[in-house]
Amino acid sequence: YGSTTGDSAALMPHLRRLYPRAIGLLERAASVGEGGGQVSTWLGRWSPAPGRKWQESVSDVGTQAAESAARRRRRSQGRFTRNFVVQGTAAEWALCWMGEIRRRMRSAGMRTELVFFVHDEVVLHGPATEAEAVRTVVAESASAAGRLLFGPAPVDFPLTVSSVGSYADAK
């Protein structure tokens, strides 16, 4: 989402054509970051502002080398703010997803528990007899979290859900 070099850069014209508002949002976030500004996630968490040292470093354009370094620092900050919008909003969705999983399992009287979450994976532990019902809860909770955050937007939240006998077998 925003790559300007390498193989993935070839996809950007297609993404821009198919999703102009989304790509526009990311480009604006990058521009704000390059200018030293802050951006926010969907729920309003703000990126940290660049410090005084960053401001000084991008203001130093007295030599060609300093100007080149300032340009690199600005682009780096732009990548950070673009990523902040995407990853921060994804984290907010994941929190809503986990909350909905927990709420649904509790209201159904399930013994399965949420035991671990990392990046985009939820690990649940419970009796095998609840596995199919938990699969449904996990999938339905992803959609519910999307509706909670984004309303009726036609967005899918594809998941791979697997039941295994050991954490070591999970993929």
Image (tube, rainbow, N blue to C red):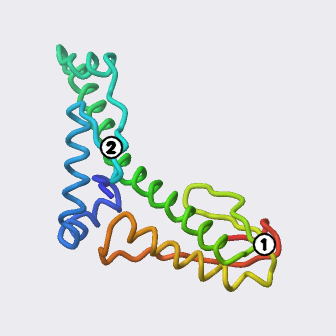
Q: Which one is earlier in the sequence, the residue at label 1 or at label 2?
A: 2
Q: Image point 71% across, 75% down: which residue?
A: 109
Query: In the rendered structure, which amino acid carries the disc numbered 1?
Result: Gly
Q: Is 116 rendered above or below residue 132?
A: above
The answer to whether marks 1 and 2 mark residues whose Cβ atoms lie closer than 8 Å is: no
Quarter of the image where one finds residue 10: bottom left
Q: Relative to the observer, which residue lies in front, 3 or 116?
A: 116
Secondary structure of the residue carrying tag 2 is helix
Q: Relative to the observer, which residue lies in front, 4 or 154?
A: 154
Closer to the eye: label 1 or 2: 1
Quarter of the image where one finds residue 171: bottom right
Q: Which mark is residue 79?
A: 2
Q: From mark 1 to mark 2, how far is it between C-alphas? A: 40 Å
Q: Image point 20% across, 33% down: which residue?
A: 35
Spot occupied by residue 79 in the image (x, y as percentages of width and height): 33, 43
Spot occupied by residue 112 in the image (x, y as percentages of width and height): 74, 71
Spot occupied by residue 18 in the image (x, y as percentages of width and height): 21, 73
